[in-house]
Image (cartoon, rainbow, N blue to C red):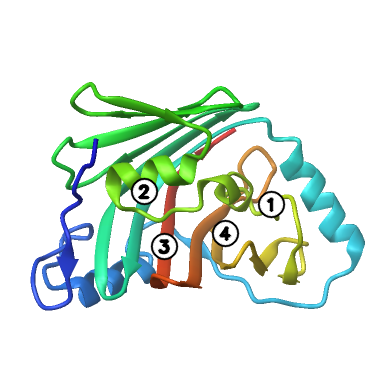
Amino acid sequence: MRMALERVMARSGSWGWCGQGGGLLLALALLLSGCAQAPLEETAPVDVGPSAQQSHAEQLAALAHWQVSGRMAVQADGEGYHGRFDWTQDGERMQLGVSGPFSQGSVRLLSDGEFFELRDGKGGSARAASADELLFKATGLRVPVAGLRYWMLGLPAPGDVQQPLYDERGRLQSLTQHGWKIRYRAYMADDVDAVSLPRKLFLDRQGLEGQLRVRLVVERWHT
């Protein structure tokens, strides 16, 4: 059930998320600059006390049910992929939809908390214990789904954490975990149900397959 994403190369193609033409470099520049019109709250790392960190982390950990949607870009060894995502988390159950220039149009990853199932736009499906491998085999996207469940909210995933930095409100600004460097470039300008949630995430990893970059720009949160 291999599905080929349209490959956007640096010397050809166009990427029109913000109504602009051009190659991969222009497309990435538009995405990383946050071309959506909604205001962003840019933040800078500071030395913050443990009470602010703990208070914010407790707020996030209490969010058992949430939905988020927006735009995504993945780059590996000069080749780029782009599309949209929507994620629904309901306790241990989840649905992650990824759409873009697939031949099938979109894929959807579902989990009951134990196994993952991936469904494509043509009615095909596959099951496995690893969400990351299912998504990669289907789309070619190297997206760390297991860690993103936590990083999406602005929380470290379970396990060792290196070099965490926080802002004055106790929100994560960057951390290194499971081989990924995660940076929070902006939070939503307005809190969502009194909780501050990420607006723009940058994820980078240097692996055997080369440099991997994942960029997520959130358009809407619902809790």
Q: Mark 1: which secondary structure?
A: loop
What crowding class fits label 1: few (fewer than 14 Cα within 10 Å), some (14-19), or many (20 or more)? some
Most extreme residue toward the left is: 12
Quick check: 17 left or right of 45?
left
Residue 91 pos. (x, y %): 65, 26
C-alpha distance separating marks 1 and 2: 21 Å
Residue 136 disc label: 2
C-alpha distance separating marks 1 and 3: 18 Å
Task: Report the residue at 49% width, 66% height from top.
Answer: 202
Residue 131 pos. (x, y %): 48, 40
At label 2, which amino acid type do we have? Phe
Residue bearing mark 4: 187
C-alpha distance separating marks 4 and 2: 28 Å
Residue bearing mark 1: 157
Check if mark 1's residue and mark 2's residue have beta carbons within 8 Å: no
Q: Mark 2: which secondary structure?
A: helix
User: Closer to the observer: label 4 or label 2?
Assistant: 2
Task: Report the residue at 56% width, 22% height from top.
Answer: 112
User: Along the polypeptide, which appears first: circle 1 or circle 2?
Assistant: 2
